[in-house]
């Protein structure tokens, strides 16, 4: 561990993993509760299409990916309170549309293929120091929002009718939630890649909810699972010369299997 901290390149990888876990793991509880676990995968396709679009027109990829990611999540918020269509409907259409756009745009901008693959499969090994500051600032602000708006987020997810009775503007809070989630996903994809981002949006919360029914404890467990997986993944990938992002994902998946098995045994 001390060897990793002593090398700036490895230290940046470790910090990026920890920041991504701290920023995304608490949101994973909401994602699981709202049953939109595939939203991250769908929006990752939109991000890849955005990068291809930027390369095609020789523009900066990150601002375009950020804008389209946030817009995609805001579109999801329009169905979050719908009585006619479940959120999975729009998730599926975003995934299909993003995938098709990626293929078509890559065909027109073949030199952008490397950039798109970098986003899809992760680039945690190339996180610069400036990106670490962006991660810290964005995730710090979003964590504060999550803390201050915990009641509104939970009621909007659990019981929107009760929320309206209490005077909570459910539609507005759904838009705020999805917009904040969109920013978190866009920044995380830019830093650590889509595969790790998607897993951090699902696995920590799913593992925590398998072990406890108390939401306050679930958020804490999700955060612990995310940070432990990030640290262990970086250390193991360094010790055994493994891909860092995939190692972290494998540990998150293993923790979920253990948590799910423990919940079944307890039941």
Image: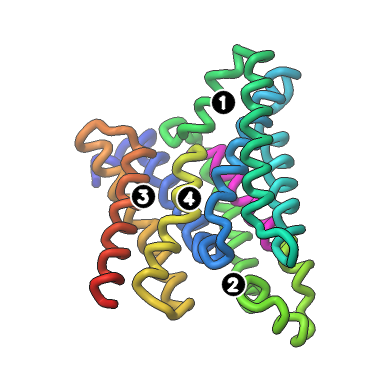
Q: Which mark is residue 147?
A: 2
Mark 4 or 1, which is nearer the eye?
1
- State the residue at coordinates (72%, 34%): 64
Query: How many C-alpha atoms fall within 10 Å of the one at disc 4: few (<14), some, or many (≥20)?
Result: many
Magenta portion: prevailing SS class = helix
Reply above or below: 208 against 241: below
- State the residue at coordinates (63%, 19%): 106
Location of residue 113 in the rendering, given as x and y in whole percent from the top left corner: 56, 18
Location of residue 94 in the rendering, given as x and y in whole percent from the top left corner: 67, 42
- State the residue at coordinates (60%, 18%): 112
Reply above or below: 198 against 220: above
Check if mark 2's residue and mark 4's residue have beta carbons within 8 Å.
Answer: no
Residue on which disc 3 sits: 230
Q: Earlier in the sequence, mark 2 or mark 3?
A: 2
Q: Earlier in the sequence, mark 1 or mark 2?
A: 1
Tally the marks.
Answer: 4
Residue at the far left in the pictured view? 240
Reply above or below: 106 against 256: above
For residue 214, side relative to residue 237 (left or right): right
Check if mark 3's residue and mark 1's residue have beta carbons within 8 Å.
Answer: no
Query: How many C-alpha atoms fall within 10 Å of the one at disc 2: few (<14), some, or many (≥20)?
Result: few
Q: Earlier in the sequence, mark 2 or mark 4?
A: 4
Position of the C terminus, as image quadrant, is bottom left
Reply above or below: 113 against 150: above
Check if mark 3's residue and mark 4's residue have beta carbons within 8 Å.
Answer: yes
Q: Which mark is residue 20?
A: 4
Q: Is residue 211 visible from the viewing direction of this image?
A: yes
Residue at the far bottom in the pictured view? 166
Q: Earlier in the sequence, mark 4 or mark 1?
A: 4
In magenta, the rendered stretch is: 177-192
User: Distance of mark 2 from mark 4, alpha carbons?
Assistant: 17 Å
């Amino acid at each position: 561990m001390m060897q990793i901290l002593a090398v700036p390149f490895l230290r940046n990888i470790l910090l990026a993993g920890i920041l991504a876990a701290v920023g995304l793991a608490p949101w994973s509880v909401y994602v699981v509760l709202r049953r939109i676990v595939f939203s991250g995968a769908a929006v990752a396709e939109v991000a890849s299409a955005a990068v291809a679009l930027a390369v095609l027109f020789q523009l900066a990829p990150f601002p375009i990916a950020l804008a389209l990611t946030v817009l995609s999540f805001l579109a999801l918020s329009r169905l979050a309170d719908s009585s006619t269509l479940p959120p999975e409907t729009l998730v599926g259409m975003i995934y299909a549309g993003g995938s098709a756009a990626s293929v078509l745009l890559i065909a027109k901008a073949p030199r952008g293929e490397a950039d798109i693959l970098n986003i899809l499969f992760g680039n945690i090994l190339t996180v610069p120091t400036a990106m670490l500051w962006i991660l810290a600032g964005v995730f710090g602000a979003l964590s504060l929002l999550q803390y201050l708006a915990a009641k509104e987020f939970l009621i909007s997810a659990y019981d929107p009718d009760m929320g309206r009775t209490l005077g909570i503007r459910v539609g507005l809070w759904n838009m705020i939630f999805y917009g904040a989630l969109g920013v978190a996903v866009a920044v995380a994809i830019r830093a650590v890649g889509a595969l790790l981002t998607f897993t951090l949006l699902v696995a920590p919360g799913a593992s925590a909810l398998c072990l406890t029914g108390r939401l306050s404890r679930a958020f804490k467990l999700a955060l612990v699972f995310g940070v432990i997986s990030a640290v262990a993944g970086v250390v193991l990938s360094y010790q055994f010369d493994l891909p860092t992002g995939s190692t972290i994902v494998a540990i998150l998946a293993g923790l979920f299997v253990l948590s799910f098995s423990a919940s079944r045994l307890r039941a």
